[in-house]
Image (cartoon, coloured by chain):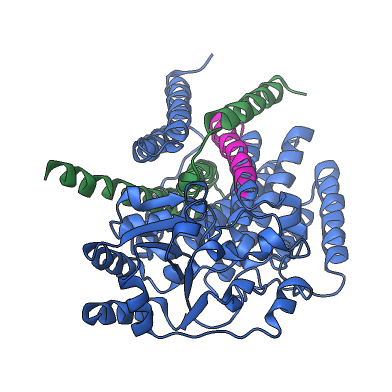
Chain colours: A blue, B green
Amino acid sequence: MLDVRGSVIASSYIVAAILFIFGLKQLSSPSTARSGNRLAAIGMTIALSATLLDRQIVSFWTIAIGTLIGAAIGVYFARTVQMTAMPQMVALFNGMGGATAALVSVAEFLRLTRAGERIGLGEGTSIVLGTAIGAISFTGSIVAFGKLQEILPGKPLQFPLQRVVNALILLALFILGVMVVTQGGSTTLWTVFAAALVLGAMFVLPIGGGDMPVVISILNSLTGLAAALTGFVLHNQMLVVAGVLVGASGTLLTLLMSTAMNRSVANVLFGAFGATSNETGAAASAVGHTVRQTTPEDTAIALAYARSVVIVPGYGLAVAEAQHTVRELATDLENRGVNVKYAIHPVAGRMPGHMNVLLAEANVPYDQLLEMDQVNGQFPQTDVVLVVGANDVVNPAARDDPSSPIYGMPILDVDRARNIIVLKRSMGHGFAGIDNALFYHEKTRMLFGDARQSLTQIGQALKSA
Amino acid sequence: MSQELVLGIYVFIMAIFVGFEVISRVPSVLHTPLMSGTNAIHGIVVLGAFLVAGSADTPLLHTLGFIAVVFGAANVFGGFVVTDRMLEMFKKREIPQGEKKDA
C-alpha cells in the first residue's frame, strides 16, 4: 500500500494525465485550442509539484536553481522570438527535451551502477533506448533549427556513402546497446550517447529545408517516446503516460503533414529531396523563355483596376515580416472596391498553418482567408494573383510534370488566373531547390526585391494611381 | 518480467490508443500549434530530471542532473509560452470581427 505522500503523488499524477488528455483534445479544435494549452500547463504544474514530495528527492537546490535558469531561458526566447521564427523555436525546445531524456537515462544508469543494484532487462533496454533516442532527437533538432535559422544551408548536405555510414553507426549503436544491457559498463553507455549524437545530426543534414516541418514533427514524437522510456527507468507512470501521448499524437500529426505535402514519411527521410536538380521538365521550359520584370507602379495600376485580387503568401512574406504591409495594401485595395482574398496553401511557409498565424497577427479578417480547395476553382475568374514569396506551392510542375520531384503535391492553380505578379527576392530556387515554370509564363510578371519593400512601394504607387 | 514492467507496458499501449484517438481530426491551421503544444507536454521529462538531480550524490550526477533540469525546464516553460503566443494570434482575429458586427 502507498503511504500518504505516495497517495498524494499518485492521485496528482492521475489528475495531471486527465488534464493532458483533455488539453490535447481541446488543442485540436480552433475555438478551444488556447484553453487546451492552459489545461495542459495546469496538468504540468500539478505533476511537477507533486513530484517534489517524492522521498527520493533529498536536495532541492539543484532543482530550484536549474528550474529558474531553464524557465528564464525558455520564457525569454518564447516571448521575444519573432512570429516568423516560431518553427525553429519549436525545434530548439524539442531538442532540449531530447537532451533531458538522454541525460536522465545516463544519470540513472550511473546511480544504479554505483549503488551496485542489479539492472534488469526491461530497465537496461529502456536506459539504452532512452539515451539513444533522446540524443538523436537533440542533435537532429539542433540541425533542424540551424537549417530553418539559415545558419546551416537549407539544401540537403550529402557526402559519399552517407547511408552506409549511417547504417554502420546504427549497427554500432545496436551492438553497444546489447553490451550495456547484458554486461553493463558506463563507458559503453557514454559511447552509445556519443554515437547517437552523431547519428542525429547525420540523419537530418541530408534532408532539405522544405521538409523540416515533417522532420521536426518526427523528432517531437521521438522525444515523447524517449520521455516515456525514462518512465520505465524511473518507475514513473506519469512519464510513461505523457510521453506516449506525445509519441502517438506526434506520429499521427507527422502522417497528416506528409499527406498534405503528398510525400511519404520514408521519402522525406531518405529521399534527399532537392539535392538533384530537376533537369528534364521545369529546366527545359526555362530554356528559351525569358523572365518578364515589372515595376511597383505598373503593379499598383494592375491591382487598382482589377475586380478581384488573390494574394498568395509564402515563406518570403514571413522572412520579410511583410504581413502588416500586405494587410494595409489589401485594405487600400478594398477601399477602392477591389475584392481581395488570400489563398492559403496548407504547407506554405515553413510549417502547416504558418501563414494563418502570421496573417492573424496582422488582423486579416478570417473570412478573407481561403483554403486551397475553396480557392482553386476561383482562379480562372481572378484578375490578378499577387504571389508574395511563395514558390513550390504554386509550381505547376507539381500538377503537370510527372518527372518533377514534387509531382503530385497539391498546389494552388495560380497559373490559371488572368494575370500573375510574383514578388520575389531573386530568381533563386525555393526550398525544394527546383525550378518553377510559373516564373517564365507569359502571363507572369516578376517584381524582384524584399517583399516588404516591394509591397510598400506598391502601396505608395497605389495612392497616386 | 516484473509485475511493474507488465503494468507499465499496459499503460504504454493504452496511451498509444488515447494519443491517436484524441487528435484524430485536426484542421491544418492547427498543425503547428498542436505540434508546439505536444512539444511542451513531453517537457514532462523534467520530472525525471527532478528525481535524478534531487537524489544525486556525486559531483558528476549533480552536474548531469542540473543540466537536465535546465534543459527540461526550458522545454516546459518555453513550449507552453510559445504555444500560447501562437494561439493568441488566432484569438485576436475574432475580436475585430465581433466589433464589426456591433458597428
Q: Position of residue A335 (x, y in %)?
A: 21, 63
Query: Farthest residue toward the left?
Result: B103
Residue at 77% in and 73% down: A276
Quick check: A245 above or below A191?
A: above
For the question of whether residue A412 can be seen, the reply is yes
Residue at 66% in and 75% down: A435
- Left or right of A16, for residue A432: right
Q: Check if residue A105 falls in the magenta segment.
A: no
Where does the magenta region start and end?
A: A234-257
Q: Check if residue A239 falls in the magenta segment.
A: yes
Quick check: B38 above or below A327?
A: above
- Left or right of A438, for residue A50: left
- Left or right of B67, for residue A449: left
For the question of whether residue A227 can be seen, the reply is no
Quick check: A439 above or below A211?
A: below
The mark total stands at 0
Q: Nearer the viewer, residue A285 or A77?
A: A285
- Left or right of A381, for residue A144: right
Question: In the rendered image, which quarter is residue A359 located in?
Answer: bottom left
